[in-house]
Amino acid sequence: MTQQPLFLLSLPRSGSTLVQRVLAVHDEISTVPETWLLLPQVYALRERGAFAEYGHTPASRAIREFADALPGGRDAYDEDLRRFVLALYARASGGSGTYFLDKTPRYHYVADDLFRIFPDAKVVFLWRNPLAIVASITETWGRGRWNVGRWRNDLYEGVANLVASYESHADRAHAVRYEDLVQDRPAAWQALFEYLELPFDTSVLTEFRSVDLRARMGDPTGTTRYETITAESLERWRATLRTPVRKRWCRSYLEWIGHARLSTMGYEMEELTDALDAVPVSARRLPSDLARGTYAWFNRVGRQAAAALLWRKRQR
């Protein structure tokens, strides 16, 4: 029996590793640490978004021409790509279980392609309070230092990509909020397993601690920190986002996301902004935040200018 792909889509630091570990307890779900497998496969047909020594742009044009000339055209190419990926999933898991779970946060870049290439896939969208995501990135990857500019693509493009993809494919997907999963609400887990058409046993909410998914790519803290499902992480963001620089940036970020996207994700703008305004201000990291924020702005502008120049040269 061919395994059915199961994709868990979210921004980084959304609690996806916890969800993956809980799902992996079930006998019908196989998984491995983040694969990133489908990113180069999908980008092989995209002119923009990747650079390579061999010349990605002409290669993508050649591959598209090759795919279009196949008997069956691009659909045939997708069909063989699907067989190739499913074969790798089966080899990685031994072919056991109904599903192979592929959890790779950067799949927000190829979310729509996943629905096209894998029409029978189950797709779960995991949302989390954007303020908590910003704080978790700062603490986990910045070690408390304000360097969210390094993950700007995930924080901005990721939100836009995931919301747009969910709105286009809501009839084929399941959405759940991280907060609902950890606030002692078995109903949220029950609904998730019902979407997967699998029986739900509350024992998975404790047995997940035996699932080890540590690898080079993935969550460097959650795989070892969390032995139980707890809501203690829900308010932790407040201690991180206390400086004037961080609060101002976060307010601007929420305004960019906007009411409509937040509503799709299951959040209210007013509730998040009120919670942010209620955070007491601290100047402890203010000089560092100002310096790092200024550097990040100049670095982003410089990179954008360099990328635009390189693209124009490649076009010529």
Image (cartoon, helix red, strand yellow):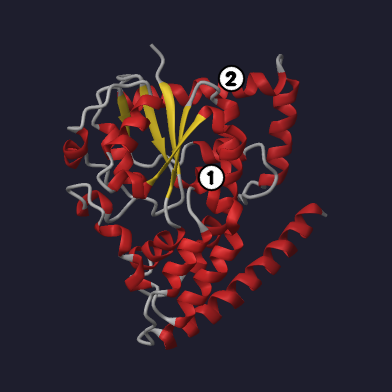
Q: Which residue is mark 1?
A: 108
Q: Nearer the viewer, residue 179 or 78?
A: 179
What residue is rendered at 77% in x and 59% in y?
Answer: 313
Q: Residues within 10 Å of mark 2 (few under 14, many from 20)?
A: few
Q: Is residue 210 or residue 45 the one in the foreground?
A: 210
Q: Going 37% across and 20% down the picture, which residue do you hit?
A: 197
Quarter placement of the C terminus: bottom right
- The N terminus lies in quadrant: top left
Could you tell me the amino acid type at mark 2? Glu
306 over 194 or under it: above or below = below
Reply above or below: 287 against 206: below
| First-in-chain label (2 vs 1) | 2
Q: Indicate left or right for 103 with 108 as reference.
A: left
Q: Which residue is mark 2?
A: 79
For discs 2 and 1, the disc positioned in front in the rendered view: 1
Q: Secondary structure at mark 1?
A: helix
Residue at horizontal 58 percent and vertical 74 percent from the top: 299
Query: How far across and how far down the image is residue 311, in percent?
Result: 74, 57
On the image, the x and y values in percent for residue 293 come to 51, 78
Residue 67 position, x and y percent, is: 70, 25
Q: CA distance from mark 2 to mark 1?
A: 21 Å
Question: Considering the numbered disc 2 on the image, is that residue within a helix, a strand or a loop?
Answer: helix
Q: Is residue 195 visible?
A: yes
- Camera sees residue 217: no
Residue 204: mark: none
